[in-house]
Image: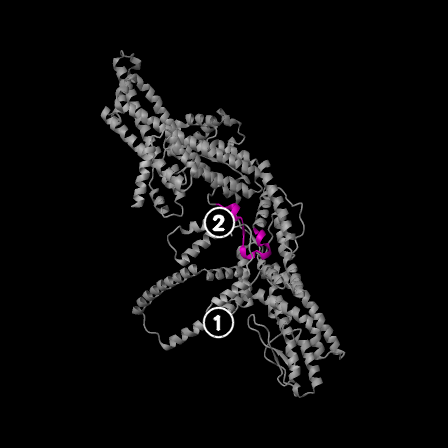
Amino acid sequence: MSEFRIHHDVNELLSLLHVRGGDGAEGYIDLLQKHRTPYVTTTVSAHSAKVKLVEFSKTPEDFLRKYEELKSKNVRNLDPLLYLLSKLCEDKETLQFLQQNAKERSESSANTTTTTSYTASQTSTKMSMQELDELRKKLGNVTASSNAPLPAEVTRKMLRDKHNKKNPTQPNPVFPNWVYDRPALIGDFITGPATAADPAVTVGTLPLPTQEQALVEDLLFVLIGVDGRDITAQPVLGRQNRSFIVDSTLDMSIKELVNRILPVASYYSTITRFIEEKSSFEYGQVNHALTAAMRNLMKEYLILVTQLEHLQRQGLLTLQKLWFYIQPTMRTMEILASIASSVDKGECMGGSTLSFLHDRTFNYTGDSQAQELCLYLTKAASVPYFEILEKWIYRGIIKDPYSEFMVEEHELQKEKIQEDYNDKYWDQRYTIVQHRIPSFLQKMADKILSTGKYLNVVRECGRDVTCPDAKEVLYTLKERAYVEQIEKAYNYASKVLLDFLMEEKELVSRLRSIKHYFLMDKGDFFVHFMDLTEEELKKPVDDIVPPRLEALLELALRMSTANTDPFKDDLKIDLMPHDVITQLLRVLAIETKQEKAIINADQTDVALSGLEAFSFDYIVKWPLSLIINRKALTRYQMLFRHMFSCKHVERLLCNVWISNKDFKEYSLHSAKWFSAAFALRQRMLNFVQNIQYYMMFEVMEPTWHIMENNLKTASNIDDVLCHHTSFLDNCLKDCMLTNPELLRIFSKLMSVCFMFTNCMQRFTQSMRLERLSQQGATDEPPAQSEAAEDVEKKRQPTKFLSDHADAVQSDAGLEVTIGKFDSNFSTLLLELLDKLSIYSTNDCEHSMISIIYRLDFNGFYTERLEKMAVERSQKAAA
């Protein structure tokens, strides 16, 4: 069972039971996924489960009748359902909960119905007896029509329309109307009003030998679907068995013997109708093959009737001899008619027909003749299915004109992998349709799907692939034969695609190239790039010229060690519509209660700077885009933007450090706020640098090495996808990007650092301009040519000081401002450390605890963190 199916079934069950609260669906889903296996490890016995349920049921006859009805329709997973229900009957606690739950739901629905009926009774009028009778008739007609099977013409039209809707370019061929309008062509009984006159002498008045000869001749006609004089067929409705009327004046001994032989004629009628109906194009190749095999057996049956007729003409065939000769055929005809009825009732096609035949073959274990017959039919019916299977597992091609094969193809464009975040080409281009899987291939379904997918990818790259171990797949009762062939094809396909991606397309080298840029692996490149683009990225995003950024990126690549990267030309600039925190929160809020609130909150037009909107993008072509798809690139982008923002704040703090060095020539060191600002800047720089070190060297590098080693041992492309996705998910989780609470605190800390650097930069600029104005006042008058420029220089400090009056304050005002920054930073940092300690303890996220050890290396925050933990435990106890 797929992960999606588990999610769907668990949510559906919880909604049916009206279960609220607790761990919710996720807890049950995780539990089921931990205990599921890729193979069917148990085969349940339905008989013991059925006995238990019959004993438990209040109406055992109705239960058995319903079970037989579902069994005749070949309902899949019926026996496992019985087993589950029998286990529920044994579990008293679960049974009591279900009974209580059913009672509560019935009471709530009754209350709703009562309210509705009370409201309706106030506005409605009394129904007359005539209207009541008409309503009763309509309901009776609806019930009758729902129980009756659809006419064959309607069924064929529905199947044809369904197929044509899926495959508009390949419509099903259609038989001409005269094939169905001429009943004499079918070979079955033609029932209608009697036209022949009654014989003058009834057969019962004749002597016994004459009666016997007349009945033998009649039976020979009836056995091939033609009415006799004294035996006539009754019309059939829907899927009923054919019944006959025998002349009532016959001798009782002869009549009894005739009634014993007549079931063969009924079986013949059922089989003939089935063959003619299922031979239509709409029912698929498997049913065509099945009916062809049945038609061959019916030829043998007709040869038998011809031989009996020859004996009858020679006067050597009596009723007793006819009964003797027909004995071996009767069992065969009974089995064929039973199979025909079950396939017809279950509306089986393709894989479901093969599942039914396979189960029926196993059920006849102990009856060698019946099992041999069913095995013959199953082998014949499986030939077209296995031909489709062979093309799929040996060449990666689906040729399924009647939509019978277990793998279904969807029209998806591989080019969208690089464009659409939600595109699921690899998962949805080819999918498994559960009801089309033959039960004997159920265990191998996933490998069959993967085998064809792997070959299909290589084939779409222009390479012709054919499995060297290709052999004809034949149905046998021993599954090992075709299981081994599927395993060989799977191993070949896995190796071909993996070698193609790893060696010819250089997947690992591509991933290393992405790591250089998105995970900031090339330090000198980023120094060059940020130096070159700093002024451009400070502008509002609408004022940035992308070609200029692309040119600067190209220059930085050529000037750094990244110049040796053969794939550097695939790196591109991307300006995003949201800042990184908004993007992450929007992603984390998907399918949660906060989703709508966050989307609505983001409607406000906030002018982003280039630094906030900046990101890298990467061009990946088919088939590497299967691995490095838009989802993977978006994860890389989120990691890069997070690291890039940290790097930007670090550069700003380093610039403040440089500015602080310039202040030493002034008397500012005597002011209290200066030492406080210096200490705060150092704490902020320590925080940012340690966070960056943790993300790059304690999260990304070790996780990357684990992924690289796993890729070396990967046996197929699905393993590669899994390892790559796991690497990105672990990086996002350990970098605190998947926890909204930690993300918000971290965002606030970065904002405080950014605002602090802005404040210090404004003060620095003010001090420098003030010094320039003082120097201009003490210097001698400049030359006449420089007078205008000097006047302008003198005006600039005045203008700047007037614009930033809030930045140039008294010592007391600056001390208060720095104190607020210090208080906010300390509070947020403590909150972050506290949350990290909670998550590392409760959620076993031990990798995050190293952040605490790095930031609290000398125990500076330990006492306050312990105090917060005590307060939290006291609140919890209260």
Q: Residue at x 41, y 36 (%)?
A: 848
Residue extent of the magenta highlight? 423-445
Q: Secondary structure at mark 1?
A: helix
Question: Can residue 430 be found in the magenta stretch?
Answer: yes
**Precedes in sequence: disc 1 or disc 2:** 2
Q: Position of residue 788 (x, y in %)?
A: 29, 17
Q: Secondary structure at mark 2?
A: helix
Q: Quadrant of residue 207?
A: bottom right
Q: Which residue is mark 2?
A: 33
Residue in front for this viewpoint, 823 or 133: 823
**Residue 233 visible:** yes
Q: Amino acid at mark 1?
A: Ala
The answer to whether 780 appears left or right of 398 in the picture is left
Say above or below: 149 vs 645. Answer: below
Q: Residue at x 49, y 25 (%)?
A: 560
Report, in whole angstroms, how far the alpha carbon at label 1 lies from the one at label 2.
44 Å
Disc assigned to residue 144: 1
Q: Position of residue 254 (x, y in %)?
A: 66, 82
Residue in front for this viewpoint, 870 or 567: 870
The answer to whether 58 appears left or right of 605 in the picture is right
The answer to whether 754 appears left or right of 705 in the picture is left
Question: Can residue 541 be found in the magenta stretch?
Answer: no
Label 1 neighbour load within 10 Å: few <14, some 14-19, many 20+: few
Determine contact: label 1, label 2, CB under 8 Å: no
**Residue 742 visible:** no
> Can you name the residue that lies furthest to the right here?
314
Is the magenta region chiefly helix, strand or loop? helix
Q: Amino acid at mark 2?
A: Gln
